[in-house]
Image (tube, grey):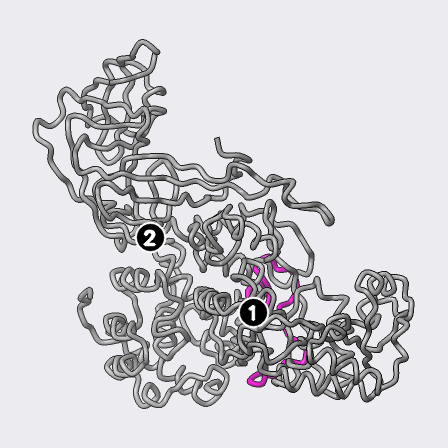
Amino acid sequence: MVAVEASPCPARHELEAQKFLQNLAVGTASILKIPLRKAFDACQTDDFCRYARDLESAAACQIDELLIRYALEEAACCSLADAYLLKRTYLAGDFISVVDIAIWVGLAGSGQRWESLRKSKKFPNLVRWFNLLSLQYADVLIKNNTITDLGLGKSIAAKVKGKERANRHVGGNGKGVLDLKNAVVGKVRLRFAPEPSGYLHIGHSKAALLNQYFAQEFKGKVIVRFDDTNPAKESNDFVVNILKDIETLGIKYDEVTYTSDYFPKLMKMAEELIIQGKAYVDDTPREQMQKERMDGTESSQGNNSTEGNMKLWKEMSAGSERGLQCCLRGKLDMQDPNKSLRDPVYYRCNPIPHHRVGSSYKIYPTYDFACPIVDALTGVTHALRSSEYHDRNAQYHRIQEDMGLANVEIYEFSRLNFVYTLLSKRKLAWFVDHGTVEGWDDPRFPTVQGIVRRGLTIEALIKFVVYQGASKNLNLMEWDKLWTINKKEIDRYCPRHTAVIEEGRVMLTLTDGPEKPFVRIIPRHKKFEGAGQKTTTYTRQIWIDSVDAKSISIDEEITLMDWGNAIVKEIMKDENDCIVQLTGVLHLEGSVKTTRLKLAWLPETSELVNLSLVEFDYLITKKKVDEGEDFLDVLNENTRKETAALGDSNMRNLQHGEVLQLERKGYFRCDVPFVGPSNPIVLFAIPDGRQQKRALM
């Protein structure tokens, strides 16, 4: 922990903080749901420290230094806070606390001094946190006159009341209002309902994150409900990994349920519909049934008697040969312009054992039948559905109406579709089943585990989803936008290392280089101290990439990164005109601004480590697979490329999942760390947002 000299908080700040907390306790405590008892007793620094320690967060005790000067007027303290907030949203725990409020009040109360620091770009994480509180709780702060009472009152209030406040419920592009119809603060109940037939992919992540967004905005709850109505595709393994994906996304849910929990109730309701004449059992062949629905032709079984329907329903329930020929259909309107209302299927017979309930049932409800009923039964107030379900919303409400259930509001959002990407779990399963990829977490997959393994940060994904806002347009997105956001996220803190491609590498001998190798300790990131330090060895003989060697001319002055300038005096080639060795002299007094080439290099030493640099390409060669087109016709045959390289000795300490930058080569994520000299460290290349080549060479 970094020691910070203690000094009393300015009296003005104490009064402002106390006034803020008093106003908050009176007018806004119920809105923000912040426990204020201890903090309200007194606003002295030690009280805030005791409050922080009481929080159920291991990180809470680490912020005592910040609380010593919660005004944070000193640049050193701002630097400490900025480093602390690098991978955190709030100062104590996962939610806003009185600690955040106190620090925010101190900063805002310092007037133009903090305004200057905000504009200096020295503390991006602290500024992000400050802006988040200003924006997220703008209405509360303005209502209690907190902002306008402080030194930055005019500048902050103007922004919040203006464009930022107007966009509080919109995505970063300002398109579409992110708001829920008829939502009541504290009573909103949402559900995220994935089918356990595969891992979550990037499309599901948007739905999950939107559910969390609205739950936080309206102080509501989120249910994770597994839509397990198709035993042929589902498994417990998918349940486990979906929960893992939800945790990775940072989704906070209140409970986990299953549609299968409601199978008895759903069967009873289906029988009630049969008795009421609102459903019938149909044995029409599937192809004929589909044609009749398209043509609006009444089924020959639509007028069966209740007794006849119940008899066939029992055959279905028993999974008999006769029952396997039937399905249960809702009796709605075969002439309705909306084809989803043309007697949809409610139940199908399926003798395959279910992953949770075994062979207890031989019939299973369709998603369209079960979803509106279970939503209503569980008190869901708002159901978030992608716009691809738009035509089926009428069916959703009709089922609730027929069963006499409460109406659930539907909120539509656009599905995320990406170029050169398959999101169908059936198609993704083909790659897994045929061994084309390693598994559902393959970095070429659009699954949450796949893209995280590729190097995408959840912070970047959240920003991307927020940027999309509530737009309902079905656009085909470019991956470049997402990877550009990701690059900005990781570039701020990921350490820098050096690698040289093993094939064709060229030795540069510096004739006036050090007689004996020496070591210096330098930062792993020149602009972020939190990245730590690394050792660099300086020797007379160094390795450089062959592509760099080909770019050098005799007597050219070059810059050796983290060392200085050198002048190449001799270029030696073999009989094939390939460069095999360079000779030069140091020119450390030379200016790096005058050189054309800034080269990464490695010392000639036995401490270097072996690397395997892995690049990936898309699994298909066409931007969009058209309806009716077989994706197998557009498979990309070359989607993975491995390149052997040498890396600096510091890379022995890389951890699994750690993100780094190889100087002049790009960003990588460590997939397999160092385990021994004979096993290379495996690094996965992270796209940086630039247009990717269509094929790996």
Left or right relative to 589: residue 218 = right
What percent of the width, then of the height, locates residue 553? 32, 15
> Which range of residues does the magenta coloring cover?
163-187
Residue at the spot 35% in from the left edge and 60% down from the top edge: 86
Q: Of callouts 1 and 2, which one flags the residue occurring earlier in the amino acid sequence? A: 1
In this view, the residue in front, 46 or 303, is: 303
Residue 171 part of the magenta-drawn span:
yes
Residue at the spot 64% in from the left edge and 75% down from the top edge: 383
Label 1: few (<14), some (14–19) or many (≥20) C-alpha neighbours in 10 Å: some
In this view, the residue in front, 315 or 82, is: 315
Residue at the spot 21% in from the left edge and 46% down from the top edge: 534
Q: Nearer the viewer, mark 1 or mark 2?
A: 2
Q: Quick check: can you spot residue 627?
A: yes
What percent of the width, then of the height, locates residue 495? 30, 48
According to the picture, the residue beneath numbered tag 2 turns out to be: 658
Q: Tag on residue 394?
A: none
Helix, strand or loop at mark 2: loop
Q: Quick check: can you spot residue 371?
A: no
- Quadrant in the rendering for residue 321: bottom right
In this view, the residue in front, 583 or 343, is: 343
In the rendered image, the vertical position of residue 243 relative to residue 649, given as above or below: below
According to the picture, the residue beneath numbered tag 1 turns out to be: 161
Q: Quadrant of the N terminus?
A: bottom left
**Prevailing secondary structure of the magenta residues:** loop
Helix, strand or loop at mark 1: helix
Q: Label 2 sits on what residue type?
A: Glu
Left or right relative to 125: residue 311 = right
In the rendered image, the vertical position of residue 295 relative to residue 26, given as above or below: above
Q: Label 1 sits on what residue type?
A: Lys
